[in-house]
Every structure is written in structure tokens, then in C-alpha cells.
Image (cartoon, rainbow, N blue to C red):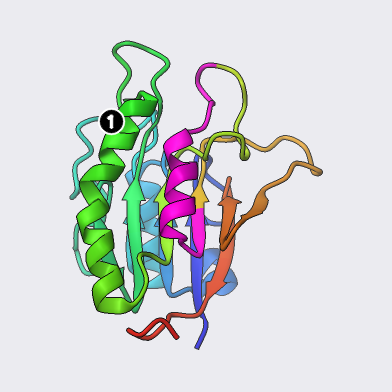
Amino acid sequence: MLMKILALSDQMVDHLYSPSVKERFGDVDLVVGCGDLPSYYLEFIVSMLNAPLIHVPGNHDPTPPARESALDPHGCASNIDGLVIEERGLLIAGLGGSIRYRPDGVNQYTQGEMARRILAITPRLLWNRIRHGRFLDILVTHAPPRGIHDAEDPAHVGFAPFNRFIARFRPRYLLHGHSHVYRRDAVTSTRVGQTTVVNVYPYRVIEIEPRTTNGH
């Protein structure tokens, strides 16, 4: 059975922040925030849809990111930054933040710092492989991988460690924000090996089929 995900990032959308969101997206199973959105916006959407929420912080979100700052309809903390979780049969990891472009910037990391953040969650990914037959289904990030949907200005360079993550752990999806889209012909979905990298700005609906423990 397909699971429907509403993924959001960076910009509030009027028809999502209104009662009509229930008519448009009432069949959504999970809401995923990819950063730089106010908690009241996320909380409104998940309350209207009665769906669970997971999210990571963006570079414009406050720090330290309070795990209770945005809650699902049951009052559960939903910040998965630096975590690996299982949600309704999907194995999901979160790595928020952007490239460091200011010395005092919040939720900003150098390439090396992001590589170390990935190293910190690697034991859980390896455990997933043993227990479930796969490392991960979805990686939720704020910034994109290097050379995929990113830019060359100091604030919007992507993370090279994400490219290595894709090659090693082969998630089915990497969902990110941070890269604003201003042109209709902009590329927002790119296939890299077994992974589909999706820029969700300002929102995208993704359908994915949960797998069983043995990977089928």
C-alpha cells in the first residue's frame, strides 16, 4: 500500500495554511518538514490533516533546535535532526542545516562537520541493514548534495558528504529544501543511482511503498 508524504520547506503557502489543506491533502499519511518553516505553520498543517510530523532545521531556524518546538497531533516531539527512526514501516534519517557561510551561523556546518554528523548515525544505519535488510528509505535534509540542485554562492553550496551517503547507503529518496526555485524549467528531481533526490520547495507530494523487514 502506497504511503503519501507531504514534504515542505522554506516558504509558507497560503492554501496549505488554510482549512482547505484538509480538502486538498486529507489522504496524506506523513508530513515532512525540510527546514526554514515556522513551527506554527507545521503544527497547523499536521493538526488539520491529523498526520504525524517529522522535520529537520534549516539555517534560518533557531538553535539549539528544540525537539519539542513542533509537535505532531499527539504532542510528540518530531525533530529528527541527527536521528534515525522508523515511521510506519519507513526507515528515515534526518540531517538538517546548511553549509557554513558565517562564522557565527546557526545550523551551519563545514563539509567535514557534516561528514562527522553522518559518521555519528552510521551505527544505526548498519543496524538497519542487519535487522531490516536495508540501510534507509528516506534521508531528510535541508541542504542538497553537492552538484545536485545547489548553487555556487557561499550560502547554497551543497554537501559532498551527502553524495557519499547516497552511494553507500542507497536511500530511495533524499528530500531537501534550501534551494529556492524561481523558474518553471528548474530541475527539482534527479536520479542518482538508486536514490531520487527531490527539492521539495515549497512543497511536494511523494508516494512511497513501505517495505517489509526483508527488504521486499
Examine the structure image and report whether residue 160 is included in the region drawn in magenta.
Answer: yes
Residue 1 or residue 214, whichever sits in front: 214
Residue at label 1? Answer: 62
What is the quadrant of the C terminus in the image?
A: bottom left
Query: How many labels were placed on the picture?
Result: 1
Circle 1: element type: loop
Residue 206 or residue 18, whichever sits in front: 206
Residue 192 or residue 54, whichever sits in front: 192
Quarter of the image where one finds residue 135: bottom left
Quarter of the image where one finds residue 111: top left
Q: Is residue 82 above or below residue 102?
A: below
From this viewpoint, which residue is outermost toward the bottom?
1
Task: For residue 71, say whether it is visible.
Answer: no
- Where is residue 6 shown, x and y percent of the image? 50, 63
From this viewpoint, which residue is outermost toward the right?
185
At a point 35% along the width and 85% down the height, the residue shown is 214
The answer to whether residue 8 is left or right of residue 79 is: right
- Where is residue 173 shown, x and y percent of the image? 51, 60
At a point 35% along the width and 62% down the height, the residue shown is 92
The answer to whether residue 115 is left or right of residue 14 is: left
Q: Is residue 47 above or below residue 150?
A: below
Amino acid type for the residue under numbered disc 1: Pro
The stretch of residues the image draws in magenta is 154-174
At a point 67% along the width and 48% down the height, the residue shown is 188
Instruction: Tell me the crowding category of disc 1: few under 14, some 14 to 19, or many 20 or more residues within 10 angstroms, Cα based.
Output: few
- Where is residue 12 shown, x and y percent of the image? 52, 44
Residue 57 or residue 159, whichever sits in front: 159
Task: For residue 118, say whether it is visible.
Answer: yes
Quarter of the image where one finds residue 130: bottom left
At a point 60% along the width and 33% down the height, the residue shown is 150
- Where is residue 20 shown, x and y percent of the image? 56, 65
Examine the structure image and report whether residue 66 is included in the region drawn in magenta.
Answer: no
